[in-house]
Amino acid sequence: MLQQILRAPALKAVLIQALAFPLMLGLVYLLARAGVGMSWLAVAVLQGVLAALLSWRAGLARWWWAIALLFAPALLAAGALDLPPVLFLLVFVFLLGLYWSTFRTQVPFYPSGPAVWREVAQLIVDRPGVRLVDIGSGLGGLVLDLARRRPDGHFTGIELAPLPWLASRLRARLSASGARFVRGDYVALDFASYDVVFAYLSPAVMTALWLQAEKQMLPGSMLLSYEFRIAARAPDKTIAATECGPLLYVWCF
């Protein structure tokens, strides 16, 4: 667990900001000695540029470059707005509930959509009593939709973040759905218990997902991944759920 946390990009991003800070101070000092004054905004932008360059050099994904670039200017802007401190606390609690341990799992909140749900429904149309699990089910849209379409099936969503999990539970209860939602980490599941595993995760975990699927999934079962491919094996089927959107990949066991 500790090694996984230490390898987390979020921790690297924090350390990069800390490393960029003395570099920024040194440059500001040298510019001041040369008679070049800098505004607070210019200092924040300089901090962001240095952090973005270090993020690139450290091999972080491109979205971390943007976060590194905008972090200091965003802090400066937030301070200038003179917002009440409780607002920052509320935003923090909301984001914590939404993303939870994304810093460790490297799987942010990625909702799919009705077009994908329809394609998944077509893939399981000839599987009576199908058992499907959505790993990282978010707000539960796919699971609720399939449970409505296929009352004979058994549809489960597992979600680690408490806020989306709670929202999906409430949606299922209010709609009297037979869908089941569990709060937890999908790595603790036994994929042998399911005929179909659906994933909309992130590139960072696809190798580990494939190792788990290859070890646990039974003959005749399917692994579905929206948008993100598995490098170790080409998909058996590729589906364009939308005209210009990501693809749905299918692996048959």
Image (cartoon, grey):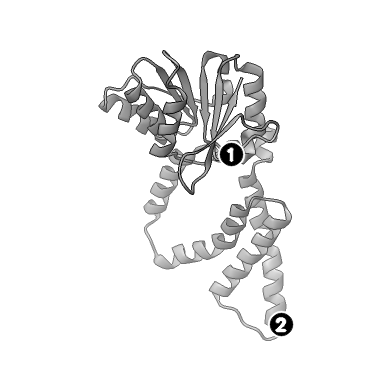
Q: Residue at x 68, y 86 (%)?
A: 35
Secondary element at image label 1: loop
Horizontal and vertical percent position of residue 195: 51, 17
Q: In which quarter of the image is the C terminus?
A: top right
Q: In this view, does 43 lie above or below 220?
A: below
User: Residue 62: percent from the left, percent from the top?
Assistant: 62, 54
Q: Which corner quadrant of the image does residue 232 belong to?
A: top right
Residue 211 sits above or below residue 36 on the image:
above
- Relative to the observer, which residue lies in front, 215 or 14? 215
Q: Where is residue 146 in the image (x, y as percent from the top left)?
A: 38, 26
Asked if residue 156 lies left or right of residue 65, the reply is left
Q: Which of 247 and 1 is in front in this view?
A: 247
* Residue that mark 1 sits on: 228
| Amino acid residing under circle 1 | Phe
Q: Using a 10 Å C-alpha cutoff, classify the residue at mark 2 as few (fewer than 14 neighbours), some (14 to 19) or many (20 or more).
A: few
Q: Which residue is drawn at 52% across and 24% down?
A: 197
Front position in the image: 84 or 97: 97
Q: What amino acid is at disc 2?
A: Arg
Q: SS at mark 2?
A: helix
Measured as percent of width and height from the top left, residue 125 is found at 42, 21
In this view, the residue farthest toward the bottom is 35
Dot 1, crowdedness within 10 Å: few (<14), some or many (≥20)? some
Q: Residue at x 71, y 51 (%)?
A: 59
Say which quadrant the N terminus sits in: top right
Residue under label 2, please give it.
33
Side of 79 relative to 177 (left or right): right
Q: Which of marks 1 and 2 is in front?
A: 1
Which of the labelled discs sits on residue 198, or is there none? none
